[in-house]
Amino acid sequence: KEYSKNFENGEVVDEKQIENAVYNLGEFVNKTDKIYKEIGFQLYIKSKELGVGSGENRVAVQGVVDLIIEKNNEVIILDYKTSRLKNENDFVKKYKNQLDLYAKAVSKFFKKPVSKKIIYSFYLNRLIFV
């Protein structure tokens, strides 16, 4: 059996999970869509917006958006997760703030709002809309 190793958190994704991901994403993405993969960003945000203070001090936030899909006039972000959480609600609870920050950065770059924030769970083998 072939495996892909995610070195960041030590989770293992097997070949069947990757096939499922490609199938699920293929249903969602059209050939005319623009696809951007692993786009890094740095965003300066007020500390009070992050819940780490009450002042106007700005904090640098950086990250990498796994997939950005530009469809006509909308922008969609998708983040892959290998976490072994039990259900969709657990994923949303754990990763909503992260995707909100990603959406803020992507909106600034594309100069239009992010219409959908999606997690692809390899463990649950499904798309989770946040």
Image (cartoon, rainbow, N blue to C red):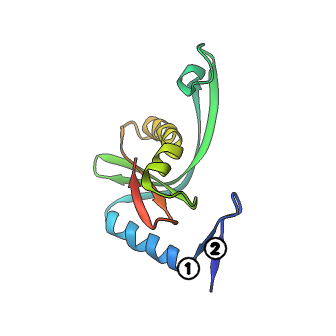
Q: Amino acid at mark 1?
A: Glu
Q: Are marks 2 and 1 in contact (CB under 8 Å)?
A: yes
Determine crowd level at label 2: few under 14, some 14-19, many 20+ residues with C-alpha closer than 10 A: few
The tag on residue 4 is 2
Residue that badge 1 annotates: 15
Provide the secondary structure element on which disc 2 rests: strand
Q: Amino acid at mark 2?
A: Ser
* Residue at x 64%, y 30% (from the top left corner): 60
Determine crowd level at label 1: few under 14, some 14-19, many 20+ residues with C-alpha closer than 10 A: few
Residue furthest front in the image: 86
> Which sits in the foreground, 57 or 18?
18
Q: Is residue 14 above or below residue 25?
A: below
Q: CA distance from mark 2 to mark 1?
A: 7 Å
Q: Is residue 7 left or right of residue 31?
A: right
Provide the secondary structure element on which disc 1 rests: helix
- In primary-sequence order, the first of circles 2 and 1 is 2
* Residue at x 70%, y 57% (from the top left corner): 8
